[in-house]
Image: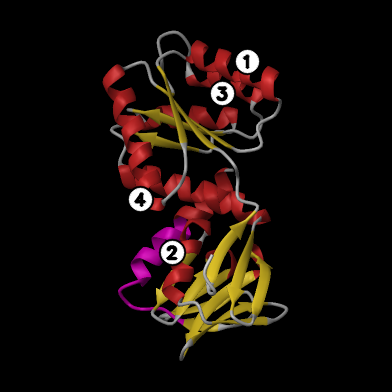
């Protein structure tokens, strides 16, 4: 590791995405989409493909008997309507062996999506699945999982560790970046761009060339200004505002559903 470096601590060891779809072509496309999203975000994932829900359930049960409860992120992308087992039944059975699984239903018909909430489905995707929608859902999962993670900052003057959820925002000041928390401020020589690349999957958004904010600390947005939980008022770039609003809406929607 270089003199100036960033590292996320306590990151999950395994991200396992299990895709269950009875149509072979759809299954292949879904697996490919997951790999594409993971590659863009530099996520290490294990992707498994299942054409029958019974095979998926049997594999999960066997894995639990051998390894116990999973300590990674388990994501299941499943068609809500399959010939041998509907999504509701699959979801209920999944919860028995993977109580913390992120269950995402895919469907060609929006009216079926509401059924997924009976099994605490995290979200649903309409077919054909759009890559950007899948990517947003996976980012939402990372935001939730980031609650217990910390950021290790290595500078020439020492090492610092701060919890991700404690960071309110980061600001670029001359040759430095200031990390703002409710309790204190950290000074870093690492560029804001590098912070952005590391923190993007965990609910942080670059609202301005000078500011990177933790959206979990967002209070309100008025007249081109963002009001943060510590009382700070930050300018948001006009061209960034529409995208930020959408990201914020997607994040809040995910929290409500979860």
Query: Which circle's residue, 1 or 3, is located before the other in the chain?
Result: 1
CA gap, disc 2 and disc 4: 11 Å
For marks 4 and 3, give the one nearer the viewer.
4
Residue 197: image tag: 2
Q: Please tell me which residue is depicted at 45% across the width and 76% down the height of the picture.
A: 192
- Residue 185 screen position, x and y as percent: 65, 82
CA gap, disc 4 and disc 3: 29 Å
Q: Which residue is mark 1?
A: 62
Give the image quarter of residue 227: bottom right
Does the stretch in magenta take in 241?
yes
Q: Which residue is mark 4?
A: 40
- Residue 244 screen position, x and y as percent: 41, 66
Query: Which circle's residue, 1 or 4, is located before the other in the chain?
Result: 4
- Do the residues bearing badges 2 and 4 touch, measured as CB atoms within 8 Å? no
- Do the residues bearing badges 1 and 4 touch, measured as CB atoms within 8 Å? no
Is residue 78 at all visible to an observer of this figure?
Answer: no
């Amino acid at each position: 590791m270089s003199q100036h470096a960033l590292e996320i601590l306590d990151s999950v060891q395994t991200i396992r995405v299990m895709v269950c779809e009875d149509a072979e072509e759809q299954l292949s496309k879904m697996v490919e989409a997951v790999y594409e999203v993971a590659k863009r975000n530099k996520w290490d994932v294990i992707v498994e493909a299942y054409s029958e829900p019974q095979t998926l359930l049997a594999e999960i049960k066997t894995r639990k008997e051998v390894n116990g409860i999973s300590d990674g992120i388990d994501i299941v992308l499943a068609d809500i309507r399959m010939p041998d087992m509907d999504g509701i039944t699959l979801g209920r059975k999944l919860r028995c062996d993977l109580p913390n699984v992120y269950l995402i239903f895919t469907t060609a018909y929006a009216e079926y999506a509401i059924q997924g909430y009976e099994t605490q489905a995290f979200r649903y995707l309409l077919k054909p699945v759009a890559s950007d929608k899948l990517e947003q859902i996976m980012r939402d999962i990372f935001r939730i999982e980031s609650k217990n993670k910390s950021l290790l900052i290595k500078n020439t003057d020492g090492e610092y560790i701060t919890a991700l959820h404690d960071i309110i925002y980061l600001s670029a000041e001359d040759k430095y970046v200031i990390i703002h928390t409710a309790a204190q401020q950290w000074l870093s020589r690492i560029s804001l761009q590098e912070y952005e690349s590391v923190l993007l999957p965990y609910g942080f958004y670059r609202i301005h060339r000078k500011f990177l904010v933790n959206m979990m600390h967002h209070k309100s947005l008025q007249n081109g200004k963002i009001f943060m939980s510590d009382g700070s008022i930050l300018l948001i770039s006009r061209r960034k505002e529409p995208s930020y609003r959408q990201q914020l809406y997607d994040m809040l929607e995910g929290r409500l559903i979860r």
